[in-house]
Image (tube, grey):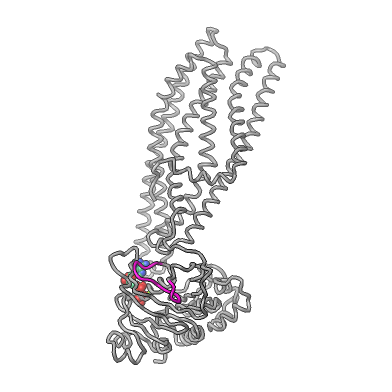
Amino acid sequence: MSTSRGALGSLIPVFRYLWPYKARLVAASIALLFTAGATLSLGWGLQVLIDQGFGGGSSADLRSAIALLLTIAAAMALGTFVRFYLVSWLGERVSADLRKAVFENIVHLHPGFFESNRSGEIMSRLTTDTTLPQTIIGSSFSMALRSSLTLAGALVMMFVTNLKLSLIIGIGVPLVLLPILIFGRRVRRLSNQSQDSIASVGSYAGEIIQHIRVVQSYTRERYESEAFSAEVERAFAIARRRIRQRALLICTAIALLFTGMSGMLWEGGQDVISGRMSGGELGAFVFYAVMVGSGVATLSEVWGELQRAAGAAERLVELIATKSLIIDPGAQQDWQQSAQPRLALEAVTFHYPTRPDVAALQDFTLPIDAGRSLALVGPSGAGKSTVFELLQRFYDPQQGKVTLDGRDIRELGLQQLRELIALVPQQPALFTGDVHYNIAYGKPEATAEDVIAAARKAHAHEFICDLPEGYQSHLGEQGVRLSGGQRQRIALARAILNDPRILLLDEATSALDTESEHHVQKALEELMRGRTTVIIAHRLSTILHADKIAVMDHGTVVACGSHEELLKTNALYGRLARLQFRDPKD
Ligand SMILES: Nc1ncnc2c1ncn2[C@@H]1O[C@H](COP(=O)(O)OP(=O)(O)OP(=O)(O)O)[C@@H](O)[C@H]1O
Ligand SMILES: [Mg+2]
C-alpha cells in the first residue's frame, strides 16, 4: 500500500462520520477553547508571580500570586480532562463506525473484487487504516486546533508584552524553524516507507505460516528463513535511515532553539538591567515565545500526520464507495416462486474480468429441467465451475442471459435468487465454530433436532458423534481436523438443512475411501430427489443417476444425452468415461 497523496480534502468524508456526535463535538470544542485560554493566562500568572509575588516583598503578596497560579492550573487540568476524554472518545467512535461501514460494504461486494484486491491488503485497510481517525481526531486534529489557538494567543500576548523583542523573534523563528521543517519532511517520508516495509514483512510471514506443510515437505525452511531475514533487514535499513534523520532533527532543533533563546535573553536581559522592562515581563515573554515556537513545531508535525491520514482516508473511502458490480434490483413482489424451478443459460458468453481475452463460456446454451438432475462432465478447465458461478450470479455474463422460470435472474432480487440455491462445493468451507454452528450456517434458527436430522440424512451423524465433543466439537482453523469426505458431508448437511429448491453440487475429484464415498453417494441421492440439480460429476455412479448429461469442452456444450447415447456418439465422452470416471465398485 503506498503513501499519501497529501490532499487533505480526502479527510472531509471522514469528518462526515463526526456529524452524528455533534453535541459532543461542540462540548469538546468548548473544552478546547477553555483550556487554550487557561494555558495562555499561565504567562500572565507567571508575570504576576515574579513582579508582585517575589517583588511585592510580603508573604501575603506571594500567597495571592501563588493562589492565582493554582487557580489557573486547576482550570487547565479540568479543561484538559474534559477535552482529552471527549476528543479521544470521538476518535475511537469514528474509527469503530468506519470499520463497520467498510466491512458492511465489502461483504456485499461481487466476488470478482476479491480477485483483483489481495485479501491481505483489504484486511490491512480494515485494521490499520481505520485506526487513523483515532489518530487524526483523537490527537492530531485536536493538537492542531490547540496549537493554532495557543499560537495565535501567544503571538498577540508576545506583542502586547514587548514589541521590540517580538520583532526580533519574528525574524528569528523562521530561521530556526526552516531547517527543522526540512528535516521533519525527510523523517516523515522515511517513516511511511518504514511502515510499508513492516507490512510486507508481516504478509510474507503470514503466507509461509499458512502454507507451512508445503514449506516443510519441500524442506524449504532454510530458504524461507533467509528470504524472511532479507525482508526484515530491508525494513531495518529503512528504519536506521529514519532514526539517523530523526536524531539529526532533534539535535539541530535543540541547538537552534537554545541559541535563539540565548540571543533573546541577552537582548531582554539588557532591558531588565537598564530598567526598561520588569523581570516578570521578560519571564512572561519567554513563556509566550516558547509557546509560539512549540506551537509552530507541533503544527508542522501534525501537518505531516494529517497528510498521511488523508492517504489512508482516501483508501478507506474508496473501499466504502466501491459498488458491487452485481446490481441487486431488490425483492420482486410479482414473482411467483415455483416449487421446482427451471433454469437455463441462453447464448451466454462470459469472460472473467481478470482474463478479458479468453472466454470461459462461449455462446453457451444449456436448459436445466425443473425438478430433474443434470450432470456436467468435461475436461479440467472446460468451464464447469464457471456455470455455477453464473447460476448463483456471482458474475453477470457479458452476452446472453441466465434465466429462472424464464425470467432473467438480473431482474430478481439477489436474496430471492440465492435463497433458492444451496451449493456443495468441491472444497467445503468450514467456519471457526462448532459442528452445530457449521451445519446451521445458512439457517441459524435451526434447532438441535433439525441439525441432527440433517446430519443423519447426510450420513454424517455417526462420525460427528465420535468427535471428542460431538456436535459441540470445534471446527475451523483452530479446531478438529476433518477428512475430505467428512468435510463434504458437513457441507451436505448444511445444504440439506436449508432445504433448497435448486442444488448445485461440485463433486470432489480427489478419491474418497470407499466407505465415505458410499456414504456421500447415498446422501446425495437423497438430497437430489425432486430438486432441480446440477452436478459437476466425476464418479460414474453419479453420472448414471443423473437424468441428463451435458458434455462440456472449451466453454461450450459439445453434446447432451444419456450415458449410453453419449458413449456411442461422442468421442470426448468416451475418452472421459475410460480415463476419468471412477466407479467406486471397481
Ligand atoms: N476467477 C477466475 N478468474 C479468471 N479465470 C478463471 C477464474 N476461474 C476460472 N478461470 C478460467 O476459466 C476457465 C474455466 O474454469 P472452470 O473453473 O470453470 O473450469 P472447470 O471446468 O470447473 O475445471 P475443473 O474440472 O478443473 O474444476 C479456465 O480456463 C480457468 O483458468
Ligand atoms: Mg471446477
Q: Is residue 51 left or right of residue 105?
A: right
Residue closer to the observer: 188 or 371: 371
Q: Is residue 126 left or right of residue 40?
A: left
- Residue 454 versus residue 183 in the image, above or below: below
402 within the magenta span: yes
Q: Is residue 178 visible?
A: yes
Task: Residue at 39%, 88% (x, y): give it.
Answer: 540
- Residue 291 versus residue 490 in the image, above or below: above
Task: Residue at 42%, 87% (x, y): give it.
Answer: 546
Q: Which residues are magenta?
A: 395-407
Find residue 58 and report its horizontal and vertical position in percent.
70, 13
Quarter of the rendering occupied by the C terminus: bottom left
Find residue 249 and report its horizontal and vertical position in percent.
41, 33
Number of numbered labels in the structure image: 0
- Residue 238 versus residue 328 in the image, above or below: above
23 within the magenta span: no
Find residue 272 and report its horizontal and vertical position in percent.
54, 11
Residue closer to the observer: 277 or 23: 23
- Location of residue 25 (image quadrant): top right
